Image (spheres, helix red, strand yellow):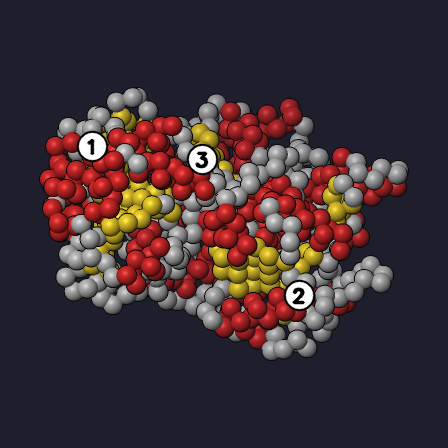
Amino acid sequence: MWSGKISEFIEHAKSGRLGGIIGMSLAHEGLSVSSSEENSWERSLPVLARVFERAGSSLSEMQILLEVPLPGTSSRADVVILGQSGNDGRCAVILELKQWPIAHGTQAQKAAWGNGDSQLHPSSQVQGYRDYLKLYSGALVDRTPQSSVSGAVFLHNMYDTAPLSGGVDDDAVHANSNLVQDCPAFGKNDEAALADWIREKLCSPPSSEYVTEFMRLEKRASFSLAASFKEIVNSNRNPWVLLDFQREAMATIDAAMIKLKASPSQQRQVIIVTGNPGSGKTVLALTTLMNAFAKHAFSQTCLVTTSSAQRHSIIGEISLARGERAQPTRKISREPVLKGSDLRIRSPGLKTGANAAGMTREEWNTYCAAWREHHHPHIHGPKYDVVLVDEAQGLVMPDKPHVDGSQASSWRRPYGPQPWHIIMQSRLSIFFMDELQGYRQVESTTPEDICKCARSEGIEPTCIPLGEEQFRTAGGRAYVAWLDHVLGFTSKPPAPPSEDEKKVLKKVFGFADNPGVMRDKLREQHVNGMRSRLLAGYAWDWITFDNPLAIDSHDGLVIPRRHPPKDLKFCWAKGDSEGQQAFNLGLHPYDTADGLFGSDASQPATAGYPLTVRGRDLDHVGVLWGQDLVWNKDHWSVNIELVFGSDMPGLRKAVRDELSRGVANGPKMKELVRAVAGAYRILLTRPMHTARVWIEDPATAAHVKKSWLDFLGDNSD
């Protein structure tokens, strides 16, 4: 990122040195710069300098920043200009620079350009950057006078920008006209108009305090978010800000819903959206839910969740945003949030007892054919217009090894592949997933499995990867890359971070020698208004499930001569849906520091577990890594005595069989390692800001710490 006064920018841009300075700055941050990016700077920045010269001295003292990271994300805005309004309110102008020469007709929020490629509408792109800064920039939110943020796109090679407001139909024209009105597009003949537009937004230079605070790139949510969420839900507006890959995915989804609305037939569509933890899958799913109802008027729309904790937390969050009390989980929800078994296609003659065998391939094909014949488009058609599935890796594929069904999700082996039922019940099915976040034995569904189900019905699915965008861990995608490597999900070592990245990463992640001190820090952060939680792997038996007077960290050790965590007692969060919802949302009994962390070291804290917090964002987490997953000289292994619960009985038995035959690191053990490592991956990727971890096994702690220090290039403590 480069920053300076506009007068300095004009001088550097005209000399041709600025592109090289930006390239070196980004390379210093560990970001690769392509030749096309360098060429775009060389062509765009002198033209922008000419615009500022047209504005005269009125803009010369404004602060300009180039290639600006959006706080807490890995996205960058081309240009941000800082100034102040007539009443001394803080102002920011965001410019997106494009070199495209011509625009053709557009559809929804996507535009097809002269090179034949399909890309996000540039006004939509800058709109996302603008809205994000308005809601999350610590230098702009909750200011008096109120801050102002504006956005525009400058297509300096395009003579006529009128096609940007056009489209292939009336809906597209309306959508794109609104976009360009909200975030205007200026072309080659509009340099004077752009200069005037910027002068209107910025009346005077920014204060030094404002510039300093903005350049810290601090992410802080506006206090108005809760209020705006309530207003938006009640008025059917979209409350979430989408960026870059998210916006491109949303544009594809919107186009599919437009096609759905225009088509009189019952032709089905399937979309699969994949992304790492923190890539914004759940936000995209909720945005799609709102758009389906409000924008496209699909009243038969539902969001399917694959765990009760996720389902009730979403329902409770919507209730709280409306200013209501969170609904008791025993009541039927008024929200369109369902569990996967609610969409099962029922057959009166199907034997579904606990011991019932699954259907043979011939029986399954007969069953599917009967469904297709009965639900012919001209008779009934699918039950839903749009079905969205979040955490779709949790759907059940009972034809896979060790997947007999799912007691937790009420899905039995004879029902067949769960994705098939969802596809057949909906005209448009959208699956959001990260297959590495599956922990339970049944959570083994992959994008390929869903594609197979779709193609069996003659549907060619659309697959949308969300790229490497990262909205958690302070935008630290390098941290997630390291974590995936150390846990064995990727074999190739991650690229070493830059010096600036190292400073961020050292704040994001760290090790705790004393779990009691880690708990005290979480308590302090909670008292200061942050969403902090203590989390733990499944390495302690759930004694309090049957005995509420017990202490899980002390009474659930199981292994002889194993010691409790130092200076810390904890009990698991209540296991029912209401308890999981309360833990996630901070409701009673987890609405106080005492309820979450105990009043002092003698009182038990509350620990959450992977399936409770999967899909949730927290500010700070402290993770207890037990002896279930340990480093054994040169490979990971799982202590079979510390795999609790009913999540993977078949796989656990298969590992015991391997061990009894003297096979210490066999294929079933590797499957179990992948599952347990996935649980810690969930826990360690929840925070927006910081994660601290205490690792019980000394050899494992030494291995993980060495890997982290090697990654940072820092072998000192």
Residue occupying the point 53% across, 64% down: 532
Q: Which of pointers 2 and 3 indicates the residue nearer the eye? A: 3
Q: Nearer the viewer, residue 668 or 363?
A: 668
Q: Give above or below for 100 relative to 89.
A: above
Apparent side of residue 673 relative to residue 210 in the rendered image (left or right): right
Three-letter amino acid code of the residue under disc 3: Ser
Task: Say whether disc 2 or disc 1 marks the residue closer to the N-terminus.
Answer: 1
Numbered label attached to residue 515? 2
Apparent side of residue 449 relative to residue 65 in the rendered image (left or right): right
Numbered label attached to residue 389? none
Q: Label 2: state its secondary structure.
A: helix
View extreme (right): residue: 661
Query: Residue 383: x and y, percent?
Result: 43, 39
Numbered label attached to residue 32? 3
Label 2 with label 1: CB-CB less than 8 Å? no
Q: Residues within 10 Å of mark 3 (few under 14, many from 20)?
A: few
Q: Quadrant of the C terminus?
A: bottom right
Question: How far apart are the alpha carbons under marks 2 and 3?
Answer: 39 Å
Three-letter amino acid code of the residue under disc 2: Pro
Three-letter amino acid code of the residue under disc 1: His
Task: Say whether disc 2 or disc 3 marks the residue closer to the N-terminus.
Answer: 3
Q: Label 1: state its secondary structure.
A: loop
The reply to whether residue 341 is visible in this rendering is no
Q: Which of pointers 3 and 1 indicates the residue nearer the eye? A: 3
Q: Residues within 10 Å of mark 1 (few under 14, many from 20)?
A: many
Query: Residue 293: x and y, percent?
Result: 33, 46
Question: How far apart are the alpha carbons under marks 3 and 1?
Answer: 25 Å
Q: Nearer the viewer, residue 25 or 417?
A: 25
Give the residue pinned by disc 1. 156
User: Which quadrant holds residue 716?
Assistant: bottom right
Label 2 with label 3: CB-CB less than 8 Å? no
Q: Label 3: state its secondary structure.
A: loop
